[in-house]
């Protein structure tokens, strides 16, 4: 059948590209092996569709096509869930970065303040909570006096 | 030193009033502007708060954590969490601080269900919170004696604030903090607080659909370490 030929050619190409990428060190060897197994299994299923029926009979799901669809749904579910988790982790990393940046601003305004002649008892801006408190209170008072 | 931490997103019309109302009860007010597109930052500054800015909106939980860390860095003995929209009555702050100052507790949660009736709390909100309490007890592992499952009004001693490492960026941090605190061996208690609901706070507040989102976020959080 034509569809079989087309699919097998596509899978052969995929296999070729996989190993070219592996040689270029874009993907690691275990990844290349895993993908190779996927493509080879897919090619076998395309060329010998009855194989899935045999396996389906052993597992007990009836038709071979059903087995393929069921396992595809399960695999997709797992992959999407993995993606969700990965996304959440990325979001948290972004939060950490945004937080670090926000904290930087309070440290910067503190150092700026000490440049303008505030008496400093400690040279390290970040490790001197007392200075920061003074700065915060001063800033507050300044705002208040500006209001009045 | 008591530092109030107010996470604010898009609270321009209300933040100034809130900051001015809270200031008399604490030593300093720290507003974390969570990437608001409006003038939240300016108004809070003018009202006398110290400002921290998130360059990108990261959610209430994230802003609260930033504020808490900054407050600890500034040497706070007590960190007070309070909402920006003015629904938490600042008059309740002394009651919240009392158990901490007397060293009877490490963490104090404000509860809307311990006496003071919340003004304007709609019936469906009450039902939703009751459902949330059951969910917290069954799925999150928060003791059932916690009466308010979703209170953003809380006070922590500095040691407790250092110990509680909450990672939920959005709305699920309330449940997460409750779980962390009640399982940590820290002494905690609930005190009655007064809450005023208005059309404004309800419009911006949580919707019933958010309950599902919170459950989903908590679920994802289990797998994100």
Image (spheres, rainbow, N blue to C red):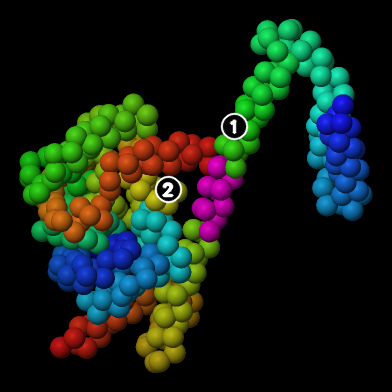
Tell me, yes or no, whether the highlighted magenta stretch contains residue B121.
Answer: no
Picture quadrant of residue A118: bottom left
Tell me, yes or no, whether the highlighted magenta stretch contains residue A87.
Answer: yes
Is B109 or B62 nearer to us in this picture? B62
Image position, residue B94 (x, y; %): 13, 57
B183 up-or-down from B93: above or below? above
Q: Which residues are magenta?
A: A84-94
Q: Quadrant of the N terminus of chain B?
A: bottom left
What residue sits 7% from the left and 41% below the top? B115
Task: From the image, tell me which residue sits under label 2.
Answer: B168
B139 up-or-down from A89: above or below? above
Marking on residue A77 = 1
Which class describes the residues within 10 Å of circle 2: few (<14), some (14-19), or many (20+)? many
Mark 1 — on which chain does it sit?
A
Which class describes the residues within 10 Å of circle 1: few (<14), some (14-19), or many (20+)? few
The CA span between labels 1 and 2 is 24 Å
* SS at badge 1: helix
Is A103 or A82 nearer to us in this picture? A82
In the displayed structure, does residue A124 sit left or right of residue B211?
Answer: right
Is A141 or A102 nearer to us in this picture? A102
Picture quadrant of residue A129: bottom left
In the displayed structure, does residue B112 sit left or right of residue A119?
Answer: left
Image position, residue B198 (x, y; %): 14, 56
Image position, residue A13 (x, y; %): 89, 42
Q: Quadrant of the C terminus of chain B?
A: top right
Q: Is residue A15 visible?
A: no
Whether tag 1 and tag 2 are in contact, CB under 8 A, the answer is no
Mark 1 vs mark 2: give the one in front. 1
Image position, residue B172 (x, y; %): 37, 44
């Amino acid at each position: 059948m034509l569809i079989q030929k087309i699919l097998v050619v596509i899978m052969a190409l995929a296999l070729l590209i996989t190993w070219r990428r592996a040689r270029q060190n874009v993907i690691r060897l275990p990844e290349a092996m895993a993908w190779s197994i996927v493509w080879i299994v897919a090619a076998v299923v395309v060329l010998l569709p009855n194989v899935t029926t045999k396996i389906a009979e052993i597992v007990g799901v009836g038709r071979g096509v059903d087995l393929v669809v069921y396992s595809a749904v399960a695999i997709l579910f797992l992959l999407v869930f993995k993606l969700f988790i990965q996304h959440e982790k990325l979001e948290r990393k972004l939060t950490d970065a945004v937080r670090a940046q926000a904290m930087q601003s309070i440290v910067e305004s503190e150092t700026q303040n000490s440049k303008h002649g505030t008496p400093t008892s400690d040279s390290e801006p970040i490790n001197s909570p007392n200075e920061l408190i003074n700065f915060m209170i001063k800033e507050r008072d300044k705002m208040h006096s500006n209001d009045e | 030193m008591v530092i109030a931490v107010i996470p604010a997103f898009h609270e321009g019309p209300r933040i100034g009033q809130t900051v001015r109302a809270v200031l008399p009860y604490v030593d300093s007010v720290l507003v974390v502007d969570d990437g608001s597109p409006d003038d939240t930052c300016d108004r809070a500054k003018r009202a006398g708060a110290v400002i921290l800015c998130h360059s990108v909106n990261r959610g209430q939980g994230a802003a609260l954590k930033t504020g808490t860390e900054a407050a600890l860095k500034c040497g706070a003995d007590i960190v007070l969490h309070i909402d920006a929209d003015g629904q938490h009555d600042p008059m309740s702050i002394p009651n919240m601080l009392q158990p901490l100052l007397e060293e009877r507790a490490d963490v104090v949660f404000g509860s809307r269900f311990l006496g003071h009736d919340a003004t304007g709390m709609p019936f469906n909100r009450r039902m939703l919170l009751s459902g949330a309490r059951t969910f917290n007890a069954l799925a999150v592992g928060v003791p059932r004696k916690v009466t308010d499952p979703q209170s953003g009004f809380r006070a922590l001693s500095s040691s407790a604030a250092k110990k509680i490492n909450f990672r939920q960026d959005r709305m699920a941090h309330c449940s997460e903090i409750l779980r962390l605190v009640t399982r940590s061996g820290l002494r905690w208690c609930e005190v009655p607080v007064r809450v005023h609901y208005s059309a404004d706070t309800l419009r911006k507040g949580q919707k019933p659909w958010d309950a599902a989102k919170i459950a989903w976020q908590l679920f994802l959080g289990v797998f994100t370490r």
